[in-house]
Amino acid sequence: MATRMFFYPGPDAGLYAIFRNSTTGTVWTGTVMAAWSDAAIGTYDVPLSFVGGDAYTLTVPTTLPTGQNYTASVYVPSTPGTPAITDTKLPDEWEFRWNGSTAEEAPEPGEAAGDYVDQAYMELVRGEKNIREWSNKDNSSDTTDTAAVQAAIDQAEALINAELKGNYVMPIELGEDATGTLILKGWAETLASTQLYMARGLQDDNAVGDKLRAERDAVMEQIARYVGDSAASSFDFEAVEVHVPYAPLVVY
């Protein structure tokens, strides 16, 4: 689970939260993401837990779709237990990316992001300056080309999914395996950063290129351990169901 504290003075006021997709604006109904409807607000509320004083905790619903960015807005109901569109919203909001078990820091608006990795993590690992330079293929800008970073992330994750789809149900629900989520994140970062660098045409022998190629090759070797009927390693993600052909028994 993932929780965050909110504060509102006075006794328990029955605070509740509404979770919206930060990109599409769709709202969590308790079972699915849907377009907003004033008439359905009673299905959107997620109660906060009053913990004493002026403190409350909000827990992310575990069934919230993974790999998406969310905004949790907290409201003070006029009538506790009965949400209304006229309720007062607290100024403090929670922006996060949900992986099924952890509420990660959401990417900044305009930054590249995928299901497994985002631009911020690539910058954390490689350095913001490197990602900025590698994304500018013709060195004509001093800002990061987010479209190039996004393309690299998309290609990296497509490669991972293509390799794993024979063993795991797609799309992978990251929250099912915390350790596996970290492994996928590391793979995606390495493959995306390598793709970003190599796309600049710097594929000659050099220290950076050699290092990245070696990391990429190591990742592909690791991925191979999770692929096939006799995979040496496995994740706890939902596995593809194997259907064994039925052969009739013949008695002689």
Image (cartoon, grey):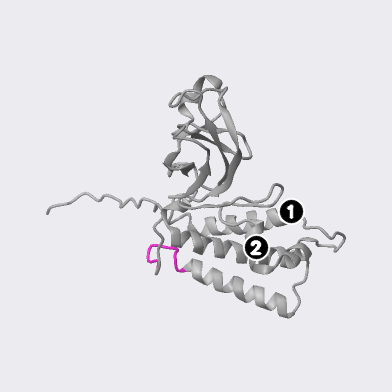
Identity of the residue drawn at 63% across and 56% down: 118
Quadrant occupied by the C terminus: bottom left
Residue 231 in picture, x, y percent from top left = 40, 66
Which residues make up the magenta segment? 225-231
Judge whether residue 60 can be spotted in this image: no
Predominant secondary structure, magenta span:
loop
User: Among all residues in the image, which is located at the extreme top?
Assistant: 39
Residue 235 in picture, x, y percent from top left = 41, 60
Identity of the residue drawn at 51% across and 59% down: 163
Q: Nearer the viewer, residue 195 or 19?
A: 19
* In magenta segment, residue 94: no
Residue 145 in picture, x, y percent from top left = 77, 56
Q: Nearer the viewer, residue 49 or 104?
A: 49
The residue beneath circle 2 is: 122
The residue beneath circle 1 is: 146
Identity of the residue drawn at 68% across and 78% down: 210
Where 89 sits versus 239, above or below? above
**Amino acid type at mark 2:** Met
